[in-house]
Image: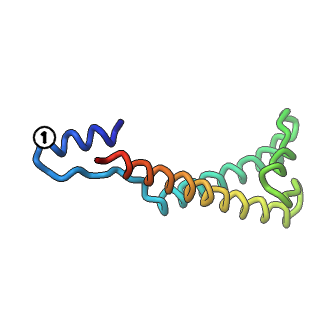
Amino acid sequence: MVVANVHTQSQANGQTPTIRTIPVAVLGMSLSLFLATSFVLCVLGYLLLPGLPVKHEALAIFLPGFELLSWQGFAIGLAESYAWGWYIALLLGTLYNFFARRQMP
C-alpha cells in the first residue's frame, strides 16, 4: 500500500516512480543486536529472578548447543541469536524487496 501511494504521488509530480525497499544490512544489524540483547536479558533474568515461571531451557529449541548455566552454552546461544537475526533479515528483506519491485509497473 505504501508503495502504491509513493507511485501515485510521483506520477502526479511528473517524477519517475520510486521503490521503497528495506536496506537488508541495516535490518540485519538491527535484528541481530535485538535478538542478542534479548538473549542476554533472558539469561540475566534467570540468574537474577530464578523463581519466575519461565522455562529458559526452551531456548535450546531455537539455539542448538545452548546450555543454561555454562560459559560455552552462553557463547553459543549469543552467537546463534546474532546469526538468527541475520538469517531473518536476509530472507525477509530480500523477499520484501523482491515483491516491492514487482509491485511497481
Instruction: State the count of labels.
Output: 1
Left or right placement of residue 37 versus residue 59 in this view: left
Direction front: furthest residue: 105
**x and y percentages locating residue 77 in the rendered image:** 77, 59
- Residue on which the image places disc 1: 12
**x and y percentages locating residue 72 in the rendered image:** 85, 66
- Name the residue at 78% across, 65% down: 75
Binning the other alpha carbons within 10 Å of mark 1 as few (below 14), some (14 to 19) or many (20 upward) gives few
Q: Amino acid at mark 1?
A: Ala
Relative vertical location of residue 7 with respect to residue 72 in this rendering, above or below: above
Relative vertical location of residue 83 with respect to residue 19 in this rendering, above or below: below
- Name the residue at 37% across, 52% down: 101
Direction top: furthest residue: 53
- Name the residue at 77% across, 44% down: 45
- Name the residue at 67% across, 57% down: 84
- Disc 1 element: helix
Left or right placement of residue 94 versus residue 35 in this view: left
Direction left: furthest residue: 14
Q: Nearer the viewer, residue 77 or 102?
A: 102
**x and y percentages locating residue 88 in the rendered image:** 60, 54
Locate the N terminus by quadrant. top left
**x and y percentages locating residue 56 in the rendered image:** 83, 44
Relative vertical location of residue 73 with respect to residue 15 in this rendering, above or below: below
Q: How is the image coloured?
A: rainbow
